[in-house]
Image (cartoon, rainbow, N blue to C red):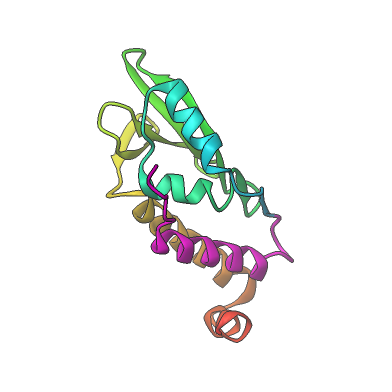
Amino acid sequence: MEKFVIDPIIIEQFKYYQNMCSLLAEFKDSTFAPPAALEKINEWEEENDIVLPHQYKSWLMLTAESSILDQFIDFSWPEIGTLKEENDIIIIASVIGDGETVFISRSEGKIMSIFEGETKEYNDFDDFLTIKSLYIESMAEEFIGEDWGDIYDEMFED
């Protein structure tokens, strides 16, 4: 069996999300569940006859579920759902602040979201995380001030 290697880009995103949640912990609550075992993910894929995108599977192997900044984003264990009944989807997250549902299109294997009836396609899971991090950074500016980036660097730069 081929060894699964967690995508380094997703490791960096995960660390960034954890760091931003730590930076904003005084203002907003966040939780990260333990990682999912590869066996559990593979079993889910087999049961549901789908292969999850590598980057999303990498995220699950860092945290099976997480709630970011008072549920701004809730990353959930993949859940089969339907969209317009004929289009099966796999729900992977919800953006509570605006009611956006994030999913994987079973037919295309792409990361997508639906918000107010409009569907958006992301290049990949990293693209989704990057776009949402812009809002997280705006929260940092709102709560900490314009120099939040300097404070972040002082706290987290190696």
- Examine the structure image and report whether residue 6 is included in the region drawn in magenta: yes
Q: From the image, which quarter does the N terminus lie in?
A: top left
Q: Which residues are magenta?
A: 1-29
- Name the residue: 31% across, 13% down: 86
User: Percent from the top left, x then y, of residue 13?
Assistant: 47, 62
Which residue is nearer to you in this view: 108 or 48? 48
43 left or right, relative to 85 = right
User: Percent from the top left, x then y, of residue 67?
Assistant: 63, 47
106 left or right, relative to 3 = left
- Name the residue: 30% across, 38% down: 110
- Name the residue: 41% across, 19% down: 82
- Examine the structure image and report whether residue 86 is included in the region drawn in magenta: no
Determine which quarter of the picture holds residue 89. Answer: top left
Q: From the image, which quarter does the C terminus lie in?
A: bottom right
In the image as oriented, which residue stretches furthest toward the right? 26
Which residue is nearer to you in this view: 38 or 119? 38
Which residue is nearer to you in this view: 55 or 152? 55
Which residue is nearer to you in this view: 59 or 119? 59
Res. 99 visible in picture: no
Is residue 59 depicted above or below 27 in this figure?
above
Is residue 141 depicted above or below 37 in this figure?
below
Res. 25 visible in picture: yes
User: Percent from the top left, x then y, of residue 70?
Assistant: 66, 50
Is residue 150 depicted above or below 112 in this figure?
below
Is residue 158 depicted above or below 113 in this figure?
below
Determine which quarter of the picture holds residue 6. Answer: bottom left
